[in-house]
Structure formats: structure tokens, C-alpha cells
Amino acid sequence: MTQNTDEVWDLARRLEATQDYQFYNPDNCKKTDYRRREIPQHFNISHWKFQDKFYQNLGLPIYAYPLLMGKDDIYHDQIVIRGYNKFFMLIKLPELLGRASKIT
């Protein structure tokens, strides 16, 4: 899947701005740098964790969390992994699917 480099660059810039000491609020957005031996040295991966309310306030172009971002071999920002922290009890799944079909 190709990524819109301008949109990803803008996302990275806006996320980094939230970490500025003047505006930092760990309740909204928290960055953790991630380093593993198995990952090529030029890959600097950052783990971003958000609160739900942060999505509406910042108008992020991606609605997934946690979000792992890094730089490719020519140092362009890219989304490495986007996940969804939503877990459902399997017993509740038919009920959830029933509600979803009524909405659509």
C-alpha cells in the first residue's frame, strides 16, 4: 500500500509538535522511541499512543492506535504499523455484528 508522503510528513510534523515542552500533555499523546537489533540501523521507529479525544482535537488523517512511525532508507517519514486497540468478548460478537448491520 503506497502512502501519501505529504500527508505522512504533515502527520509526523504535527505529532512531533505535541512533544514540545511548551505544549506537552501526556494525557493526549505520548511518544516512545523503539529500538531493536533486528531492525536496520537507519530505521528510527517511534511508538505513538493517543487518547480517544486527541483524534477529534488534532484532526489526524489516520484513526488508528497505537501507531508506529519510522523513516525509510532515504529518511522519508512513513507509517510502519497502524493498529487498533479494540478487543471484544467473543460472546458479544453476534450482538455487535447485529448492531453494525442495522446501522448500514
Image (cartoon, grey):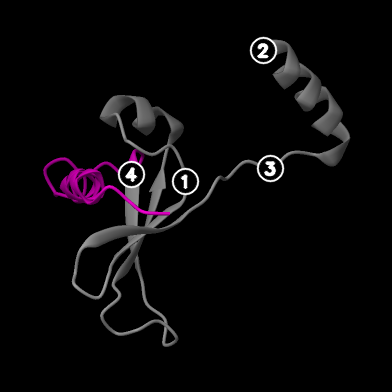
The mark lying in front, picked from 4 and 3, is 3
**Residue beneath the point at 85% across and 28% down:** 94
Q: Which residue is mark 1?
A: 65
Q: Which residue is mark 4?
A: 29
Magenta stretch: give its range: 1-28
Mark 2–mark 1 CB contact (< 8 Å) = no
Residue 98 sits above or below residue 94 on the image:
above
What is the total number of numbered labels drawn onto the structure image?
Answer: 4
Q: Which residue is mark 2?
A: 103
Label 4 secondary element: strand
Instruction: Compute the Cα span from label 4 to label 3.
Output: 21 Å
**Residue beneath the point at 25% across and 80% down:** 42
Label 2 secondary element: helix
N-terminal-most mark, 2 or 4 = 4
In the rendered image, residue 31, in percent from the top left (x then y), is placed at: 32, 56
Dot 2 surroundings within 10 Å: few (below 14), some, or many (20 or more)? few
> Is residue 5 one of those drawn in magenta?
yes
Instruction: Compute the Cα span from label 2 to label 3.
Output: 20 Å
**Residue beneath the point at 27% across and 47% down:** 4
| Amino acid marked by disc 1 | Tyr
Q: Which residue is mark 3?
A: 87
> In the current view of this chain or complex, which residue is farthest to the left?
22
Give the side of residue 15 with respect to residue 37, left or right: left
N-terminal-most mark, 2 or 1 = 1
| Amino acid marked by disc 2 | Ile
> Is residue 50 one of those drawn in magenta?
no
Instruction: Compute the Cα span from label 2 to label 1.
Output: 24 Å
